[in-house]
Amino acid sequence: MASRLRSALPWLGTVALLGYLAWTTDVDTVARAFGDVSLLGVLLVGLLGTAATFATDTWCVSLAFSRFVCPLAYREALPVKATSYFLNILNYNAALVGMAFYVKRSKDAPFWKSLGSLFLLNVADILALCVMLAFGLLLTVGSDTLDAATLGVAWLVVAGGLGGGFLGLALLRLDIPIPLLSRLLRSELLSALSRVTVPTLLLFVALRVLFLAQYLLAQYAFLKLFDIPVPLDRLLVYLPLLTFIQIIPISISGLGTVQLVMRHFFAPYVLVDAGHAFGVVDACSTAGIFAFLIFRVLLAYLFLGKLSREVIAKAGSVGREMDSQPENS
């Protein structure tokens, strides 16, 4: 019963948040925003943004496996990443498990070590987000464009992300005997982190900054299409915060949570009557979701084969089981 309740809570949270968004939005404004925007522009941004991020993400996956697990050429990594795009629709855990399963089946690589190389990329993502956020905060020093609450949360995230990341790496390097934790730190899941050198870690952080910058430019273009001219220095603050909000486990993939916070961040920049700003932001966020989803599925489908379909079926069920486990909450 408790396991079922934990599994149901994100779905209930998603329904509640989306229901609130639908109840409080101005439907006429949403319809008008969709009517005024260039459909070709939305599709073009979705296509280019998806292609660029897919290419860079695949490069990172290929490099991570090649450095810490087994040689994986770029073209071999394409179906691996494509598999994760389909599984990401279910949940993030399923996507990670799917990529590790794929490499295990195709290259006979150790599963936990494969999953560990992807965990290294997750750590690099956190550090890259904190770097981008810190840079954005430094660019806005002296301005009054960010409210005190946003500034406080943002600096806390930077301190916690960078401090926690380097503390964790120090624990791995020093091999300090800590009850229960020491065994986990020596596991295959964390083997990539325990072996990574500082130059290699900085390389991965730089690549993930490039990857996130591509998302940032796509978001900037979507906002411009909907006449929401958010300056790039503000987006350097908003995008990392939205990404961290997305992983809060109160809804499926942050759906609803992110859109609600986007209202708070972007509504002041909408070039219409303030009373209709939420509707324009809601239209923009919805267009972004569907544009990326459609092109992700189409692009990923080009690289799927028989093994991908087998992995998707197996990893999907494992990912759902992982989500229902207490230690995964």
Image (cartoon, grey):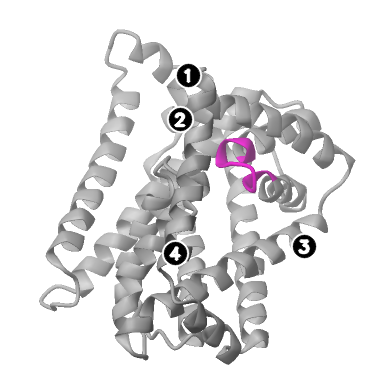
Q: Residue at x 14, y 73 (%)?
A: 141
Mark 2, Cα crowd under 10 Å, few <14 / some 14-19 / many 20+, is some
Residue 288 on image: x %, y %: 56, 70
In the drawing, does residue 321 fall left or right of residue 186?
right
Please say whether residue 119 is visible from this viewpoint: yes
Q: What element carries label 3?
A: helix
Question: Of marks 4 and 2, which one's residue comes earlier in the chain?
Answer: 4
Per the image, the residue denoted by label 1 is 2
Q: Do the residues labelled 2 and 3 touch (CB within 8 Å)?
A: no
- Spatial distance from mark 2 to mark 1, Cα to Cα? 38 Å
Q: Is mark 4 on a helix, strand or loop?
A: helix
Question: Of marks 3 and 1, which one's residue comes earlier in the chain?
Answer: 1
Q: Which amino acid does label 1 sit on?
A: Ala
Residue 248 on image: x %, y %: 39, 43
Of badges 4 and 2, the one in the foreground is 4
Per the image, the residue denoted by label 4 is 23
Report the disc number at residue 298: 3
Q: In the picture, residue 98 is in which quadrant?
A: top right
- Is residue 210 within the magenta segment? no
Q: Are marks 3 and 1 in contact (CB under 8 Å)?
A: no
Q: Which residue is drawn at 66% across and 23% down?
A: 110
Residue 185 on image: x %, y %: 40, 20
Per the image, the residue denoted by label 2 is 195
